[in-house]
Image (cartoon, rainbow, N blue to C red):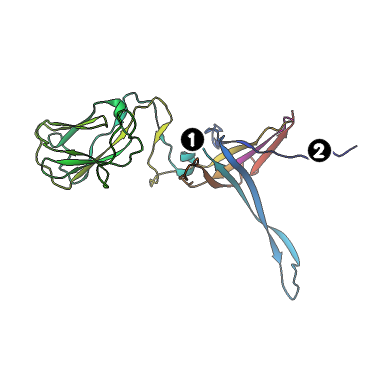
Amino acid sequence: MALSNPRSFYSVHSVTPYNTSTGLYYGILRVLQGSTFSMSGETVELRGGSNRFAWTAEDGNINAELQLQCSEYPNFIFELFLGKAPTGVSAEASGNVSDLTDKNGLSVVAATGFLATITVSTAADLKFGKYIVKATGADTAKVYKSTNIDNARGTDASDYTSDDLEIASLTGIGSGSTHAITGHGITLTAGASAGAMTSGDTATFEVRPVSTGSNGMTATFGGLSDVFPEFGALCYSAQKGNGEMMELDIFRCKALGFPLGSSEKSFSSWSLNAKAFYDSARAGVFSMRVVQP
């Protein structure tokens, strides 16, 4: 009988993390540059005397690790690796403008004070970013915006008026007066009994533009009560031309943190190492299946 063809695995197809208690899937990672499960061990050697070699050796500890390289950011990876499940943001036909909140001092925001409300005057002109309103006098203020990334949306907004990221200057603020931020679809309205502001006081608000998609998210990470759950992982190599497929089921894993960043003219990617450990109920660390239909 001739030798059989060598077994080989080709490329990476997907990784599916799952809940170790319920078995339910968190989702699937498809835009992968690499998925590697490695087990590296050490031997404990007996040495002594003038012998340059070990007299004998026994098995030491074994480290098991799942290494992932990926270029997609589904919500579940933030839950698993950053400890907080994000809140999804669905389509917003009218966009979203948050409430104005005092940041420094208390003279800018009040129901009867300077800025009682922020209203959307033209939804199509809303520009993504974080905004700051700074009192420059008793009845004057300036508005600043964190980024010009969205300036071309709707009515093309003029760029910053100064290096400190100012986009508008408001004057004549008085009882019930309204103040539109040109090109940004927002109107600020003073309270019915608007009083004098304290120069230097600031307030902030955030804007999301009109959205027809459902891929948005919001979350705050790094909280003291954040929890990093353990998870299982099903890793699949690509299906070969002869139909052969390979599956690794890694029973229990845990990873803390992953990088968030990007480089010039390239898609953002992340990589992490998840530690794998023993599962008493399944009497092992991982299982493997190879099929050739």
Considering depth in this image, is 189 or 14 the residue closer to the camera? 189
Residue 155 among those drawn in magenta: no
The reply, left or right, for residue 77 in relation to residue 93 is right
For badge 1, the amino acid type reads Pro
The residue nearer to you, when weighing 232 against 172, is 172
**Magenta region:** 242-251
Asked whether, in this view, residue 191 is left or right of residue 18, the answer is left
Secondary structure mainly formed by the magenta segment: strand
Q: Secondary structure at mark 2?
A: loop
Instruction: For mark 1, give the secondary structure.
Output: loop
Q: Position of residue 72 (x, y in %)?
A: 51, 37
| Residue drawn where x is 47% and y is 44% of the image | 264
Q: Identify the residue under disc 2.
A: 5
Residue 71: image x %, image y %?
52, 39
User: Residue at position x 48%, y 42% from top?
Assistant: 265
Residue 185 in the image: above or below residue 168: above
